[in-house]
Image (cartoon, rainbow, N blue to C red):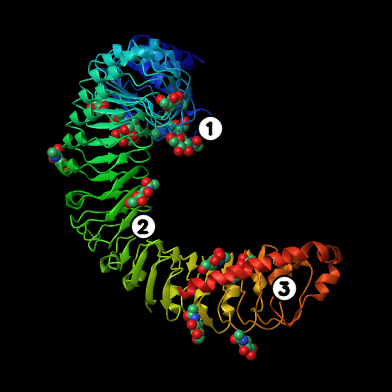
């Protein structure tokens, strides 16, 4: 008992006489409160009580000065789940407080106001709530850096920040601050970095912000929805290197005065309602590396003056109303890596030396009116990852350099007038995930060698491909979609196709395939849609087809399949679309189970197949159909005659 009393006295004595001991005590309070009930036991495991005067200085993340006072606390990436207690106010010598990525919750305690030495406050990536009241901010006169990114702080943006004369860095993104950006924010003395994106801000962007002559970084968009447009006065913020006003409902023109931002390397204005043309004056931004004007209503062309933007690395102009040719200087921009122009109305041929700068990585001109040939050296860099030209009027061949481009991840060139053989290298690219070349005029045969561990989608529909389906397709272990429909393929369907473990969709309709449906198909349990219609397949539907428990579409219409319609199909409850029409099935059509889902059209054109049992078992639909369905049937007949006629006509062309 006496020893305990002595100990208590000792503790009290030390607390009263040595503020370093107070720091220890406060750190333990901090630990207890920040951990909360949910944290793991080993969180802040070395923050333990000790009678040693300096013990707390070796707590992980804690730094002391010579007087053993805490000057820095850095507890990052520790799941704590509790809150910040009032005892934080004890650390009057604290210069750096980083409690980031710690899952902390609750309000910020007003005792933070006692941290009068604080230079850096980083509470980013937590779940702090409530307001950020002015009385906490005002006493922090030494504050240089505040990062509260990704919390749930509400209320208006505190005007008190402008009183902090040393404040250089203010990052309040990813909270729920609301109301307008205060006009007074134009009065910051030393501010270099201001980021307010992803809040709920509204009102006009104050043009007076242009007085922030020390500002190098300004980000205001995302989730905020302002009225009006980009203040032309912003052209006066000549220190700016980074300006991001994306996705914040800006309207009107892009002010030509922005061209005065000679030090700007990034201009992001995407996802607004900007209209008018791209001002040629922007070419004065000689340092510009990243320009994104996508998702606006901009018209006109790419200004010729942009040939001066020699540092341009990213040019995103997609989803506007831009038109005209892509000027030849674009291919000479020495650093261009990303060129994304999709969903505009650009036309004419692309500059044929595009890609010759040897840096291109992302190339997307989808949905324009481009004509002419594909530039032959797009992959000169060996770094090209996307080659996306769908929905244009390109003709000629796919250049061999695409087939040898090992870096490619996506190839999309459907809906053009491309012809010739598909470069065989395309079928052996190691990283490619998507190859879509449908609706072109490619001819020739598929190569016998095919490989690629990443390819998920291979779509070659509606071309003029001949020859056989190569068994080597089995090497595409990640393949999910195989579309070879509407070509002139012959021979048998190789059984190897159905050993692919992830295959869900197969369309080989509209070829000249012979032989039987491979029996391997019944083991390909990932299948959900199989269309083998319009071929010359013979034999029976493979025994065991009910194993395909995910199959929802099976179309084998217009072949020469024989035998009985397997009764087991009645057990395939996922099958919602079955078409066995125009074959040579015979015997009695089974009834019951899933068969009741399909209408008679699914079995039409099989002269030896009897549907009698079906109608006798379905007397209601049979009797009802006499008067009601006859005219509909006639109507459908007329439609199908028209369709067939059009089809013939099309093939004659
Ligand atoms: C801190 O104390 C706990 C028990 O309270 C103990 O399990 C842990 O090992 C101690 N950590 C250190 C670094 O001494
Ligand atoms: C506070 O952090 C800054 C870096 O942001 C560092 O330069 C400074 O030395 C730190 N101060 C203390 C007392 O740890
Ligand atoms: C805080 O600690 C983390 C590692 O936990 C480190 O990455 C970061 O640089 C530190 N921050 C400061 C300001 O010292
Ligand atoms: C903790 O916060 C991080 C982000 O800061 C988040 O990714 C993680 O899911 C959170 N953990 C829990 C258990 O909430
Ligand atoms: C705040 O901490 C997070 C997580 O450690 C870090 O990513 C971020 O850069 C820090 N902010 C500042 C301004 O140093
Ligand atoms: C978006 O901008 C328009 C035009 O300035 C304005 O009328 C509208 O109120 C703004 N929308 C929101 C949600 O602020
Ligand atoms: C272009 O970028 C480089 C660094 O990538 C930089 O050194 C150079 O100053 C920039 N050019 C201009 C005109 O700003
Ligand atoms: C796109 O440009 C073509 C000519 O290049 C023109 O015929 C067409 O009307 C334009 N379409 C739109 C939507 O502007
Ligand atoms: C298979 O491709 C043809 C066109 O060639 C198309 O009409 C049919 O709808 C496709 N089948 C399925 C199940 O999507
Ligand atoms: C299919 O083959 C037959 C005979 O082998 C031939 O007459 C027909 O033109 C071929 N059809 C197609 C689309 O290749
Ligand atoms: C099955 O394929 C044929 C021929 O391609 C097509 O006409 C028919 O509409 C398809 N059946 C269904 C139910 O979609
Ligand atoms: C369908 O196959 C049978 C033999 O099973 C054959 O007699 C018939 O000519 C074939 N029909 C067509 C259109 O190929």
Query: Total marks drawn?
Result: 3
Instruction: Estimate the x, y position of residue 585 in percent, counting from the top left.
Output: 69, 81
Locate residue 596 relative to residue 513 in the image: left or right: right
Quadrant of image for the C terminus: bottom left
Residue on which disc 1 sits: 38
Crowdedness of circle 1 by 10 Å Cα count: few (<14), some, many (20+)? few
Circle 1 — which element? loop
Q: Are marks 3 and 2 in contact (CB under 8 Å)?
A: no
The mark that comes first in sequence, 1 or 3, is 1
Circle 3 — which element? helix
Give the number of the disc on residue 231: none
Rendered residue at 67%/71% (across/down): 546
Instruction: Estimate the x, y position of residue 187 in percent, counting from the top left.
Output: 27, 13
Cα distance in 3D space between marks 3 and 2: 46 Å
Residue on which disc 2 sits: 392
Residue on which disc 3 sits: 568
Circle 2 — which element? loop
Which callout, 3 or 2, points to the residue nearer the camera? 2
Instruction: Estimate the x, y position of residue 357 in percent, counting from the top left.
Output: 18, 54
Rendered residue at 78%/75% (across/down): 611
Locate residue 639 relative to residue 125 in the image: left or right: right
For residue 93, which quarter of the picture?
A: top left
The mark that comes first in sequence, 2 or 1, is 1
Locate residue 13 relative to residue 494 in the image: left or right: left
Instruction: Estimate the x, y position of residue 254 in percent, counting from the top left.
Output: 29, 31
Which callout, 2 or 1, points to the residue nearer the camera? 2
Is the residue marked 1 within 8 Å of ligand 4, measured from its CB? yes
Crowdedness of circle 2 by 10 Å Cα count: few (<14), some, many (20+)? many
């Amino acid at each position: 008992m006496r020893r305990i009393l002595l100990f208590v006295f000792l503790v009290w004595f030390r607390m009263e006489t040595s503020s370093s001991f107070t720091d220890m005590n406060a750190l333990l309070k901090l630990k207890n409160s920040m951990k909360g009930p949910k944290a793991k036991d080993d969180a802040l495991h070395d923050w333990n009580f000790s009678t040693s005067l300096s013990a707390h200085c070796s707590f992980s993340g804690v730094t002391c000065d010579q007087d053993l006072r805490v000057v820095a606390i850095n507890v990052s990436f520790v799941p704590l789940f509790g809150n910040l207690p009032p005892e934080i106010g004890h650390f009057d010598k604290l210069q750096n407080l980083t409690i980031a990525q710690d899952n902390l919750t609750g309000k910020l305690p007003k005792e933070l106001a006692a941290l009068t030495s604080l230079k850096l406050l980083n509470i980013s990536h937590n779940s702090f709530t409530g307001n950020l009241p002015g009385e906490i901010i005002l006493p922090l006169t030494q504050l240089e850096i505040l990062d509260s990114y990704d919390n749930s702080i509400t209320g208006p943006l505190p005007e008190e920040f402008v009183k902090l004369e040393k404040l250089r860095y203010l990052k309040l993104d990813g909270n729920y601050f609301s109301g307008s950006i205060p006009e007074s924010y134009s009065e910051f003395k030393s501010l270099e970095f201001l980021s307010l994106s992803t809040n709920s801000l509204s009102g006009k962007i104050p043009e007076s912000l242009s007085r922030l002559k020390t500002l190098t970084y300004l980000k205001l968009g995302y989730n905020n929805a302002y009225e009006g447009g980009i203040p032309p006065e912003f052209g006066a913020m000549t220190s700016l290197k980074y300006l991001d006003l994306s996705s914040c409902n800006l309207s009107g023109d892009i002010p030509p005065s922005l061209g005065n931002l000679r030090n700007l390397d990034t201009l992001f204005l995407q996802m607004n309602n900007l209209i008018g043309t791209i001002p040629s004056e922007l070419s004065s931004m000689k340092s510009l590396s990243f320009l994104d004007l996508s998702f606006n209503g901009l018209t006109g062309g790419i200004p010729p003056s942009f040939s001066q933007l020699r540092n341009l690395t990213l040019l995103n102009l997609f989803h506007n109303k831009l038109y005209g040719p892509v000027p030849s200087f674009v291919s000479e921009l020495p650093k261009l890596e990303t060129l994304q122009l999709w969903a505009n109305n650009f036309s004419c041929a692309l500059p044929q030396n595009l890609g010759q700068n040897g840096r291109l990585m992302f190339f997307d001109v989808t949905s324009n009116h481009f004509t002419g040939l594909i530039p032959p050296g797009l992959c000169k860099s060996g770094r090209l990852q996307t080659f996306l030209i769908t929905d244009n009027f390109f003709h000629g061949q796919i250049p061999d350099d695409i087939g040898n481009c090992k870096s490619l991840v996506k190839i999309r060139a459907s809906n053009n007038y491309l012809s010739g053989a598909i470069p065989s290298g395309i079928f052996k690219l190691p990283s490619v995930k998507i190859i879509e070349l449908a609706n072109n005029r490619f001819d020739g045969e598929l190569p016998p060698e095919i490989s690629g561990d990443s390819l998920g989608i291979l779509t070659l529909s509606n071309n003029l491909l001949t020859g056989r389906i190569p068994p080597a397709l089995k090497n595409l272990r990640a393949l999910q979609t195989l579309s070879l429909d509407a070509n002139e393929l012959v021979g048998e369907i190789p059984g190897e196709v159905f050993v692919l473990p992830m295959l869900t969709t197969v369309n080989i309709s509209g070829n000249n395939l012979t032989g039987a449906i491979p029996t391997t198909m019944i083991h390909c349990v990932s299948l959900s849609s199989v269309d083998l219609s319009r071929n010359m397949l013979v034999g029976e539907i493979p025994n065991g087809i009910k194993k395909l428990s995910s199959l929802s579409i099976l179309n084998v219409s217009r072949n020469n399949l024989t035998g009985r319609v397997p009764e087991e199909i009645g057990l395939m409850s996922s099958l919602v679309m079955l078409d066995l029409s125009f074959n040579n099935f015979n015997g009695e059509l089974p009834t019951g189970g899933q068969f009741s889902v399909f209408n008679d059209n699914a079995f039409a054109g099989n002269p030896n197949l009897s549907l009698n049992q079906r109608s006798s078992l379905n007397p209601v639909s049979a009797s009802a159909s006499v008067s009601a369905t006859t005219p509909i049937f006639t109507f459908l007949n007329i439609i199908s005659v028209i369709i067939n006629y059009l089809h013939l006509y099309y093939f004659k062309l």
